[in-house]
Amino acid sequence: MAFYNLSKEDRIKLTSEIKNNIFTGLNKNKLKNKIIYFSNDDTYIRKAAYLSLGKIYFENFELQHKILQNLESLFSEDEPKISQIVINTAGEIGIKDFESVEHFFDSGLIDKDHSVRNAVIGSLKKMSEKNPKPVLKWAKKYLHHTDKEIRREICHGIELRGRTHPQDILPLLKELQNDSVPRVRNTLIHVLGQISYKKNCLMLVIEDLKSWENKDVVNKAIEEIIDVHDRYKNFSALTQKEAIEYIKKYYSGK
């Protein structure tokens, strides 16, 4: 039965069972016997598995090396579902201990399977939000990668940190303003819109955009910012009218 077809009580019970089985497998050096969780067709079973493994990592210092070894072994099998869960597990670990799992993201960024690369983006979002210093330093290395998809994935992945601390990611976004690929520039514009409507963020975004030399990108970003204040009006710190008035007052280029 699918995870969310179970009652809440049974979901809690199953999640606890998954964690206990993974923990037992690690202690008996038989984690591969629990691989059924990592390759399960149910997204939520797989999620319960990687969340459990992330918790076990921080609850049991003596198992950390073994967990990393197991993740290495599982990742080397080159099975997309399993590789995706390895990246997601590494993302849970990277929220506090990025240095130990950084190499998984170097590999995941260039994986041939889109689901693995999407897991990198999702993990990058949560890691950069909670553990920004090492994660953004790592992300910066890939801003000018020769692969346009990697540049786009990095841009998308740092978005979540920008929703609360735009000043942390604006310098990185600025480096992409003259990217030659429309898909990358469109992602950049999207991210600028997404970080602009949160509380106290519009002011920082507009102030930074004043120093950008690519006025075409800036103007398109401002159009997106205005539009996003309408699309997300139920969540925006300012109304669209207030956003427009602010931009007219403080951005002379528009």
Image (cartoon, rainbow, N blue to C red):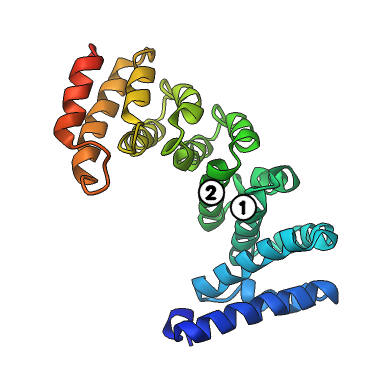
**Amino acid type indicated by mark 2:** Lys
At x 55%, y 26%, the residue is: 144
Instruction: Give the residue pinned by disc 2.
Output: 126
Q: Determine whether the residue tagged by mark 2 lies in a helix, strand or loop.
A: helix
In the rendered structure, the answer to whether residue 161 lies left or right of residue 57 reads left
x and y percent of residue 66 in the render?
A: 83, 62
In this view of the protein, which residue sits in the foreground, 213 or 196? 196
Whether residue 51 sits left or right of residue 177 in the image: it is right
Establish if 31 lies above or below 8: above
Q: Which residue is mark 1?
A: 91
Asked if residue 233 is positioned above or below residue 115 in the image, the reply reads above
CB-based contact (under 8 Å), mark 2 and mark 1: yes
Q: Is residue 69 visible?
A: no
**Category of crowding for the residue at label 2, using alpha-carbon neighbours closer than 10 angstroms: few (below 14), some (14–19), many (at least 20):** many
Q: Quadrant of the C terminus?
A: top left
Q: Amino acid at mark 1?
A: Gly
The disc, 2 or 1, on the residue closer to the chain's N-terminal end is 1
Q: Residues within 10 Å of mark 1 (few under 14, many from 20)?
A: many
Where residue 246 sits in the image (x, y, percent)? Answer: 21, 23
Residue 78: which quarter of the image? bottom right
Q: Is 40 placed left or right of 34 in the picture?
A: left
**Residue 113 visible in the snapshot:** yes
Residue plotted at (17% across, 27% down): 244
> Whole-percent x and y of residue 154?
52, 38
